[in-house]
Structure formats: structure tokens, C-alpha cells
């Protein structure tokens, strides 16, 4: 018999200076988000200790920095961000970037973000 995911308080869309995200589903050890990044905007240069992330582009163009690699992704392309890896997501295009993010790990809280550079000065930057 297939198991049913344990859903924990699915969040409404949360607005950010760079766009927005919506938690689509969450269960033990995983979280699935829809992320929208406005044209010309980017998320902070960051890392996570407790989770990995898979990003699948739905529409638009994503510039991804993951470790020492920079990649451009378009619709139906994906990438993997391992735990403890410096990464950044950016929309270099003229239309909104929409992607699905699948997080896996023992702890998936938003406070597991260590920011090294943030265009919006939301938190003091950690030293590189």
C-alpha cells in the first residue's frame, strides 16, 4: 500500500525582494517549493548545512552558481546543489524565472541559510 506524505502546514506564497516562493508540499525529510525570480534579480550567495536542493526550470532562464561552476539553464533543465556548497540563483532574462525546488535533508528550516552576499542587505554577510 503506498504511503501518504505527511504534510506540515503548507505555507501561502511568501514575497521576497527578488520575487516569491510557495511551499507546495512538505513531509519528513523533504520540501517542494515553487520559486519565482523577477527579471534582473538574484537570491543571496548562500549555503546550507543540513539540506541539498534540486532545481528544475519551468520557464525563463536561470544563471546558477554552484561551487566554482556557473551554468545557464532554460526550461526543462535542472541542477543539483549539494549540502555545504556555496550557491546562487539569478534571473538574467527579461521574463520571470519559475522553477521547482526539491529540498532533501534532516532539517529544512529557513534559518539554515548562511548568506555570504545579499543584494538586499537582509542579514550581515558571513565571511567567505
Image (tube, rainbow, N blue to C red):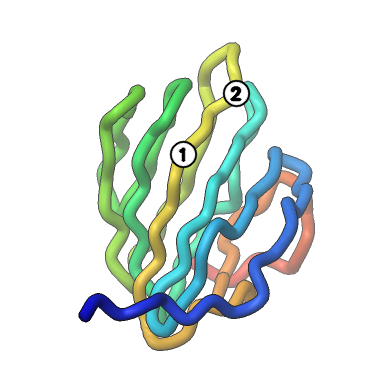
Q: Is residue 65 above or below residue 102?
A: above
- At a point 59% along the width and 64% down the height, the residue shown is 115
The answer to whether residue 36 is visible is: yes
Q: Answer left or right for 41 relative to 32.
A: right
Across and down, in percent, residue 16 comes to: 75, 48
CA gap, disc 1 to disc 2?
10 Å
Q: Quadrant of the N terminus?
A: bottom left
Picture disc at residue 80: none
63, 56: nearer the viewer: 56
Q: Answer left or right for 2 relative to 60.
A: left
The residue sitting at the front extreme is: 1
Can you identify the residue that label 1 sits on? 99
Q: In this view, does 60 lie above or below 90?
A: above
Across and down, in percent, residue 23 comes to: 59, 59
Q: Answer left or right for 69 relative to 36.
A: left
Question: Mark 2: which secondary structure?
Answer: loop
- At a point 63% along the width and 22% down the height, the residue shown is 39
The residue sitting at the top extreme is: 94
Q: Residues within 10 Å of mark 1 (few under 14, many from 20)?
A: many
The answer to whether residue 84 is visible is: no
- At a point 35% along the width and 72% down the height, the residue shown is 104
Across and down, in percent, residue 42 comes to: 59, 38
Question: Mark 1: which secondary structure?
Answer: strand
Q: In this view, does 108 lie above or below 62?
A: below
61, 30: nearer the viewer: 30
Q: Answer left or right for 1 relative to 9.
A: left
- At a point 48% along the width and 42% down the height, the residue shown is 89
Across and down, in percent, residue 38 comes to: 66, 29
Can you identify the residue that label 2 sits on? 96
Q: Residues within 10 Å of mark 2 (few under 14, many from 20)?
A: some
Amino acid at each position: 500500500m503506498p504511503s501518504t506524505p505527511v504534510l506540515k502546514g503548507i505555507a501561502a506564497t511568501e514575497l521576497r525582494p527578488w520575487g516569491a516562493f510557495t511551499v507546495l508540499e512538505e513531509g519528513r525529510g523533504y520540501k517542494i517549493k515553487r520559486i519565482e525570480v523577477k527579471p534582473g534579480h538574484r537570491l543571496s550567495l548562500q549555503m546550507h548545512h543540513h539540506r541539498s536542493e534540486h532545481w528544475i526550470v519551468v520557464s525563463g532562464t536561470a544563471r546558477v552558481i554552484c561551487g566554482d561552476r556557473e551554468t545557464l539553464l532554460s526550461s526543462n533543465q535542472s541542477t543539483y546543489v549539494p549540502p555545504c556548497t556555496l550557491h546562487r540563483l539569478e534571473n538574467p532574462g527579461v521574463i520571470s524565472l519559475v522553477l521547482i525546488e526539491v529540498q532533501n535533508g534532516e532539517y529544512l528550516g529557513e534559518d539554515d541559510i548562511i548568506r555570504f552576499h545579499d543584494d538586499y542587505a537582509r542579514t550581515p554577510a558571513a565571511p567567505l
